[in-house]
């Protein structure tokens, strides 16, 4: 069996094992080391140290066994694994991950989002589907404070979903709003997914953030437009609030609530993103400011407790460890895969198809869309996107543009069964009578909005390129 065939077998076996439910990071590391042992197998190196040790002394039987075992581990794959681990932990881009995570978790626990949703719900009361619109706007703002999809969906599922059901909203529409709005966190900066893509592709994270801002707002705008139009066409799906539900709050009270709930969070977000986009601070430095700002907001809203701080730190450490070990495993896996010739086989196959750049983009996005059914975004970004990256120069595609298209596309991985993690997050905290099928049904129209956003972005790429060009030049 030739090395390229072994590489393809390695990739297929990985997909099969993941579908069985094994942990991704440890599966990557185990397969990378296992196949890497075969790839880098060198009998001369393996026994060279053993022979030298035997020549210098006359070891007893147990010492010979120890030297023999030591010789078995004298393989380049172990050097590769150690070097990859050090490279990941020394990566400056990934330093921003725990800081942004902490910012998101601490803001989530400061009750700021609850205040924000209540205020926006009242402020938007005259708009068709006002409560759903308020939920989407809240999700968009919360997404800019945290790139954690599970946190946004869970929190908004506890705040907005019961409120919409109580207001007689259609269950599927309400569920679709929460699931779709909650996934915006992997697209809108400071997205953790974009940090991971930047580390995997070598694209500047600062330019990625600038490029993703308007596409993220475009998608959020399409979601809001869809809700408003459907509420106009089918008002029974999203009834207008009654006077009792609005509570008779005056305009002055709404302005005060906006000042106390919307603007502190908005100021923190603008300060963090502005510092990154205009080069006033590195992503890690801005993330540190954001983490301190989030902590300050918890004190300002009198929401700080040691329990909340401990929970935020624990969740930050756990998620950061997952991301880092995924990188260690994926870089080990991809290094062995490339060494065996798997990447070259795929490159030669795709370039041999003689397809146009648009057909390559469509093919790549369809593959990523299908991979989103059984896999999560982290696995797709770290393992499969790097397979496409070497092909981008051949088709004249900017890796920044490709990354933003992928980020848009990966919204679908949270919305489409059988994985559809946002649907499962919502089902886990929804009332018992809400069926998973209803949640899936509510997601489908928002999937159409994602596809529409990708088409618009392809037709008008300046949506992604304009801000990076204005700030950083061509």
Image: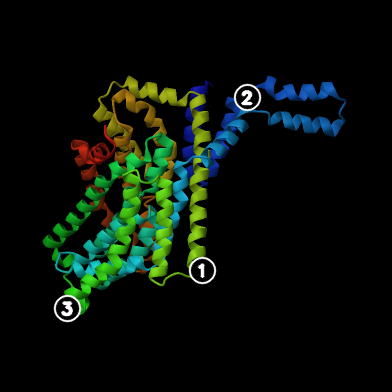
* Res. 167 image quadrant: bottom left
Q: Residue at x 49, y 37 (%)?
A: 330
In 3D space, how far apart are the residues under numbered discs 3 and 1 (Cα atoms)? 40 Å
Q: Which residue is mark 1?
A: 306
Q: Secondary structure at mark 3?
A: helix
Question: Which is more toward the observer, 136 or 15?
Answer: 136
Residue 160 drawn at (x, y percent): 30, 67
Q: Is residue 92 above or below residue 121?
A: above
Q: Which residue is mark 3?
A: 243
Q: Residue at x 44, y 37 (%)?
A: 383
Residue 470 drawn at (x, y percent): 24, 39
Question: Which is more toward the observer, 45 or 419?
Answer: 45
Q: Secondary structure at mark 2?
A: loop
On the rendered image, what quadrant is the C terminus found in? top left
* Res. 174 image quadrant: bottom left
Q: Secondary structure at mark 1?
A: helix
Q: Is residue 403 above or below residue 442?
A: above
Direction left: furthest residue: 233
Q: Which mark is residue 41?
A: 2
Question: Which is more toward the observer, 338 or 415?
Answer: 338
């Amino acid at each position: 069996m030739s090395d390229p065939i072994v590489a393809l077998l390695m990739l297929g076996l990985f997909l099969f094992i993941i579908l069985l439910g094994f942990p991704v990071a440890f599966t990557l590391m185990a397969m990378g080391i296992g196949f890497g042992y075969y790839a880098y197998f060198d009998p001369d190196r393996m026994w060279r140290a053993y022979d030298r040790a035997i020549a210098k002394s006359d070891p007893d039987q147990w010492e010979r066994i120890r030297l023999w075992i030591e010789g078995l581990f004298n393989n380049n794959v172990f050097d590769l694994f150690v070097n990859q681990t050090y490279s990941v932990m020394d990566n400056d881009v990934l330093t921003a991950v725990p800081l942004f995570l902490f910012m998101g978790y601490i803001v989530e626990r400061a009750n700021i989002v609850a205040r924000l949703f209540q205020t926006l719900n009242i402020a938007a009361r005259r708009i068709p589907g006002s409560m759903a619109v308020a939920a989407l706007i809240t999700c968009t703002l919360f997404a800019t404070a945290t790139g954690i999809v599970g946190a946004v969906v869970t929190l908004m599922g506890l705040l907005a979903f019961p409120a919409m059901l109580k207001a007689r909203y259609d269950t599927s529409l309400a569920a679709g709003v929460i699931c779709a709005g909650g996934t915006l966190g992997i697209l809108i900066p400071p997205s953790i997914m974009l940090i991971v893509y930047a580390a995997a592709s070598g694209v500047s994270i600062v330019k990625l953030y600038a490029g993703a801002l308007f596409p993220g707002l475009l998608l959020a705008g399409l979601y809001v437009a869809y809700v408003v139009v459907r509420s106009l066409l089918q008002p029974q799906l999203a009834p207008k609030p009654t006077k009792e539900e609005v509570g008779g709050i005056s305009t002055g009270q709404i302005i005060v609530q906006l000042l106390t709930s919307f603007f502190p969070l908005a100021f923190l977000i603008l300060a963090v993103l502005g510092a990154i986009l205009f080069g006033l601070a590195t992503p890690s430095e801005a993330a540190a400011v954001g983490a301190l700002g989030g902590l300050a907001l918890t004190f300002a809203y009198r929401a700080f407790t040691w329990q909340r701080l401990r929970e935020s730190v624990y969740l930050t450490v756990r998620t950061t460890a997952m991301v880092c070990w995924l990188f260690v495993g994926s870089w080990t896996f991809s290094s062995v895969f490339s060494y065996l010739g798997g990447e070259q086989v795929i490159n030669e196959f795709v370039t041999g198809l003689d397809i146009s750049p648009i057909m390559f983009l469509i093919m790549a996005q369809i593959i990523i869309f299908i991979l989103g059914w059984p896999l999560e975004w982290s696995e797709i970004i770290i393992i499969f996107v790097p397979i496409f990256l070497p092909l981008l120069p051949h088709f004249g595609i900017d890796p920044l543009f490709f990354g933003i298209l992928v980020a848009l596309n990966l919204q679908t991985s949270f919305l489409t069964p059988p994985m559809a993690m946002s649907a499962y997050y919502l089902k886990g905290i929804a009332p018992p009578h809400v069926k998973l099928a209803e949640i899936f049904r509510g997601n489908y129209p928002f999937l159409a909005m994602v596809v529409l956003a990708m088409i618009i972005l392809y037709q008008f790429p300046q949506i992604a390129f304009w801000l990076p060009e204005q700030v950083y030049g061509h």
